[in-house]
Amino acid sequence: MANKRASEVAGDLAQHVGELVREELRVAGREMREKAARGRKGGVLIAAAGGLLLYAGGAALSGFVLMLSRVMPPWAAALVTSGVLTAVASALGAIGLGEARKALPLLPERAAEDAVSVAEAGTAVRPSP
């Protein structure tokens, strides 16, 4: 009779552990999706900075250089234009990098802490021989 009860308890324990593991995996997945969403915002800003750097070498550069070349030598106008556009792109890149770092590390930290707590609680409940 004691063996049957022990086997029932073991079966219940296995079922509960399985449920707990599945729930922890769901929590970890949810946490990873949240982190990915935060990282996506930083990635978009970094991409915008890269796009600005490309345009800095093209159309905006030539128009501003032509305007400035009326009051200064054309080579100086080109340097001033390039410096302004680089500064704006650098600022956007720095903001985007800060947003992307908020998503790091890409690990489900809360779920891992919960799993450790559950494991510690499980070892504390283990009956002594």
Image (tube, rainbow, N blue to C red):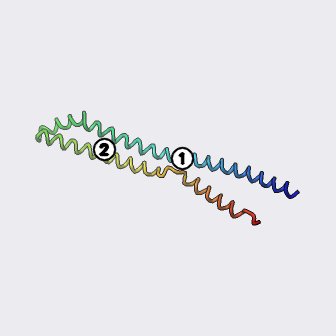
If you read the primary sequence from the N terminus, does the residue marked by circle 1 or circle 2 appear first? 1
Residue at x 33%, y 40% (from the top left corner): 50
Q: In x, y percent, where is residue 111?
A: 59, 53
Outermost top residue? 59
Per the image, the residue denoted by label 2 is 89
Q: Which residue is mark 1?
A: 32
At numbered mark 2, what does the secondary structure look like: helix, strand or loop?
Answer: helix
Q: How would you rate the neighbour count of disc 2 (Cα within 10 Å): few for under 14, some for 14-19, many for 20 or more?
A: many
* Residue 70 coordinates in the image, percent (x, y): 12, 37
Using the rendered view, name the quadrant where residue 127 is placed: bottom right
Q: For numbered disc 1, what is the local secondary structure?
A: helix
Residue 109 location (% of width, % of height): 54, 54
| Residue drawn at (81%, 56%) of the image | 6
How many numbered discs sit on the rendered protein? 2
Dividing the picture into quarters, in which one does residue 43 lie?
A: top left
Pick whichever, 93 or 121, lies toward us: 121
- Residue 44 percent coordinates (x, y): 41, 41
Tell me, for residue 45, which label it has, or none: none
Residue visible at 55% across and 51% down? 108
Nearer the observer, disc 1 or disc 2? 1
Characterize the local packing of mark 1: few (<14), some (14-19) or many (20 or more) Cα atoms within 10 angstroms: some
Q: Amino acid at mark 1?
A: Met
Q: CA distance from mark 1 to mark 2?
A: 30 Å
Side (left or right) of 9 relative to 107: right
The N terminus - image quarter: bottom right
Camera-nearest residue between 39 and 9? 9
Residue type beneath disc 2: Ala
Q: Residue furthest right?
A: 1
- Mark 1 and mark 2 residues within 8 Å of each other at the beta carbon: no
Residue at the limit of the structure toward the bottom, as seen here: 128
Up the image or down, 13 lies above or below 76; here it is: below
